[in-house]
Amino acid sequence: MPLHLERVEWMPSPPLAPDDGPIDFEHLQRMTLGDAGIEHEVLTMFLAQSARLVRNLAAMPSDAGALVHTLKGSARAIGAFAVADAAARLEAVITGRSDPSAALAELNEAVEQARAAIEAVLRRS
């Protein structure tokens, strides 16, 4: 049986998470079933949790891997995918026992951007 080759035009896949800013508010809306009260509550919780975790991670304690893993999950839940991605990179660095300073700086920047976007939304509501 002869092999038939066909040229297929390659088309890039859409991104797994839209790059519309630090928070994917459509994702957040889906996760909270469109309940504005729940959205407000989880965003407020993320503000407090992310500040505490970033502050604790600055000292790179022995449980840093668990702290960054927690932040990664929380960020994914609210649609802060840049934070989640930066947390995943820091988690890999911690696991690999490499110098975490660059990954930690990247995470801090991503968290700062997400927090600014959340604070702007919460001020409007």
Image (tube, grey):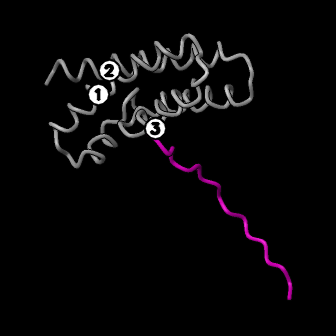
- Is the residue marked by circle 1 packed among few (<14), some (14-19), or many (20+) residues within 10 Å? few
Q: Quadrant of residue 27?
A: top left
Rendered view: 26 above or below 47:
below
Which amino acid type corresponds to the residue marked 2 in the rendered image? Ala
Q: Relative to residue 106, is residue 120 drawn left or right?
A: left
Please state which amino acid type lies under the numbered disc 1. Met
Residue at which label 1 appears? 45
Q: Which residues are magenta?
A: 1-18
Q: Position of residue 113 (x, y in %)?
A: 41, 18
Residue at 23% over, 23% down: 121
- The picture places residue 1, in percent across and down from the top left corner, at 86, 89
Q: Are marks 2 and 1 in contact (CB under 8 Å)?
A: yes
The answer to whether residue 63 is magenta is no
Residue 73's label in the rendered image is 3
Task: Estimate the spatial distance between the alpha carbons at disc 2 and disc 1, rounded to whole Å.
Answer: 5 Å
Secondary structure of the residue carrying numbered label 3:
helix
In the image, taking residue 14 as reference, residue 21 lies left or right, namely left
In the image, what residue type sits under mark 3?
Gly
Q: Does the magenta-highlighted stretch encompass residue 2?
A: yes
- Residue named by callout 2: 48
Instruction: Name which quarter of the figure residue 86 lies in.
Output: top right
Q: Secondary structure at mark 2?
A: helix
Report the label total: 3
